[in-house]
Amino acid sequence: MFDDDVVCSVCGLDDVLCVCEEVAMQESRMKVVLEKRKWGKIYTIITGLDPKEFDLKSMAKQLRTKLACGGTVKGSNIELQGNHEFRIMGILEKMGFDKDSIDLIKKT
Ligand SMILES: [Zn+2]
């Protein structure tokens, strides 16, 4: 008896040969975006994390506590109120992220 072949829906290759998942992981770089919204309010948004891989709600909670700010999870983004440009990288690093793999983008 043979198992049904499992074929990747993205590249069409046999599941054993497919590297789509690895490629996706390399491409999903974490980004910290500083964004100015209405009334000139600055938000610090963490994006690029896979919600299936990371517990974003618990991360948001830790960040809110450490930065003493408001914040929420929207889709796969963590949105924090305020400009945390100078503290966020150190905090993310302490949480186990490599700061060299995080892009900081300023839209302010
Ligand atoms: Zn594939």
Image: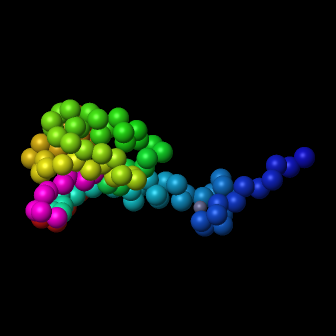
| Image quadrant occupied by the C terminus | bottom left
Q: Does residue 57 show up?
A: yes
Is the residue 58 above or below the residue 17 in the image?
above
Left or right: residue 107 versus residue 76 is left
Residue 33, percent from left and from top: 22, 58
Does the image show residue 99?
A: no
Q: How many numbered callouts?
A: 0
Can you say whether 89 is above or below 8 in the image? Answer: above
**Snapshot colouring:** rainbow
Side of 23 where 108 appears, left or right: left
Q: Tell me the quarter of the picture where residue 5 sits.
A: bottom right
Q: Residue at x 25, y 53 (%)?
A: 45
In-image side of 81 versus 1 (left or right): left
25 or 81: nearer the eye? 81
Residue drawn at 48 percent across, 45 percent down: 52
Where residue 61 sits, quadrant-wise, is top left
Q: Quadrant of residue 97?
A: top left
Q: Position of residue 54 (x, y in %)?
A: 41, 41
- The x, y position of residue 4, in whole percent, is 81, 53
Residue farthest toward the front in the current orientation of the protein: 39
Residue 85 position, x and y percent, is 12, 50
**What residue lies at 34% left-to-right and 47% top-to-bottom?**
73
Residue 55 covered by magenta stretch: no
Query: Which corner quadrant of the figure contains ligand 1?
Result: bottom right
Question: Residue at coordinates 72% horizontally, 55% vertically from top-left?
Answer: 6
Q: Which residues are magenta?
A: 38-46
